[in-house]
Image (cartoon, rainbow, N blue to C red):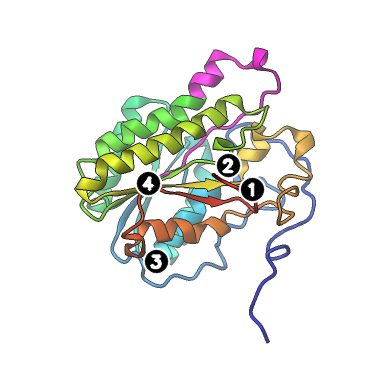
Amino acid sequence: MSDLNNPLTKFYSGKFEKQRQEAPALQRKMTPVPDCGEESYTGSDKLSGRKVLITGGDSGIGRAAAIAYAREGADVAINYLPFEEEDALEVKQWIEKAGRKAVLVPGDLKEEAFARKLVHAAAEELGGLDILVLNAGMQQAVKDIKDLTTKQITDTFTTNIISMYWTVQEAMAYLPAGGSIITTTSIQSEEPSAHLLDYAATKGAITAFSKGLAAQLAPKGIRVNTVAPGPIWTALQICGGQPQEAIPEFGQKELLERAGQPAELAAVYVFLASDQASYVTGQVYAVTGGSFFA
């Protein structure tokens, strides 16, 4: 019997219920709960002994990466907002179940002092830092530019891109030759939605930042790459990231006719962090369900 899986039906492909949580949202209260590989990801020691910090590691893509990294042999620190503690504690359990050390560092990346302190706290608890995954994001849909407040623009840019400068600046004290930085951009960098003017702009900035940083750090032997997800079913979508009327058919216009699940990105984050990607830097890895990334 073939063990192949049809990508059209491998994960949930039905309509989603309209559901609204205030931002930030808890993944555990979503319907259906996103699949982050909790029951499916199998490791093979690709990251044995590595020390990893993941921002936005409590849910969604960051959670999937954290679980996968632990099962590949890494110790993992995750950052998240204090409200998201319930989700973060679940991730901690999965990391420890894999036999690895889990470090929780709650705090808001919009605060420069915290963003900088985060890196040192993680490195101290982990005993070093080899891999930095900058995944935290803010996304709030606004249909009319006249309704887009200065506070939202500032908060989105600070969370999504400005905090990356702060964390990388501090991480340079720890990252060795052979280390890896992985950022999360988006298909929005190439195909911006009309209702995500601020979010899409930050994702374009992340793509440029990642490519430029790769050029700067290559002589140090540190690789930098970015992952560009398409419509992935995460807590970001149901707490204002998408208009409620768009939730039922979220992702179903892609070639694969469904939204992606966080678990479907985990292997990409693992690859980019591993020695298997030793000749890969300055690249954008698109996981979009069919949308093309130039």
Of callouts 2 and 4, the N-terminal one: 2
Residue under the image location 67 percent in, 38 percent down: 238
Tell me how many marks there are. 4
Magenta-colored span: 132-155
Q: Nearer the viewer, residue 95 or 56?
A: 56
Q: Nearer the viewer, mark 3 or mark 2?
A: 2
Residue with the mark numbered 2: 187
Rounded to the nearest whole Å, what is the CA distance between mark 2 and mark 4? Answer: 17 Å
Q: Secondary structure at mark 4?
A: loop
Q: Which residue is mark 3?
A: 72
- The image shows residue 150, relative to residue 78, as above or below, that is above
Residues tagged 1 and 3 counted as in contact (Cβ below 8 A): no
State how far apart marks 3 and 2 are (Cα). 27 Å
Residue 164 sits above or below residue 276 on the image: above
- Report, in whole angstroms, how far the alpha carbon at label 2 lies from the one at label 1: 7 Å
**Residue wearing tag 1:** 291
Q: Is residue 286 rendered magenta in the image?
A: no
- Say if mark 2 contacts mark 1, CB within 8 Å: yes
Tell me where residue 246 appears, x and y as whole percent.
76, 38
- Relative image position of residue 120 (x, y in whole percent): 25, 40
Marks 2 and 4 in Cβ contact (< 8 Å): no
User: Which x, y percent locates residue 77?
Assistant: 36, 49
**CA separation in Å, label 1 and label 3:** 29 Å
Q: Amino acid at mark 4?
A: Gly
User: For numbered disc 1, what is the local secondary structure?
Assistant: loop
Q: Is residue 30 left or right of residue 187?
A: right
Q: Is residue 190 left or right of residue 184?
A: right
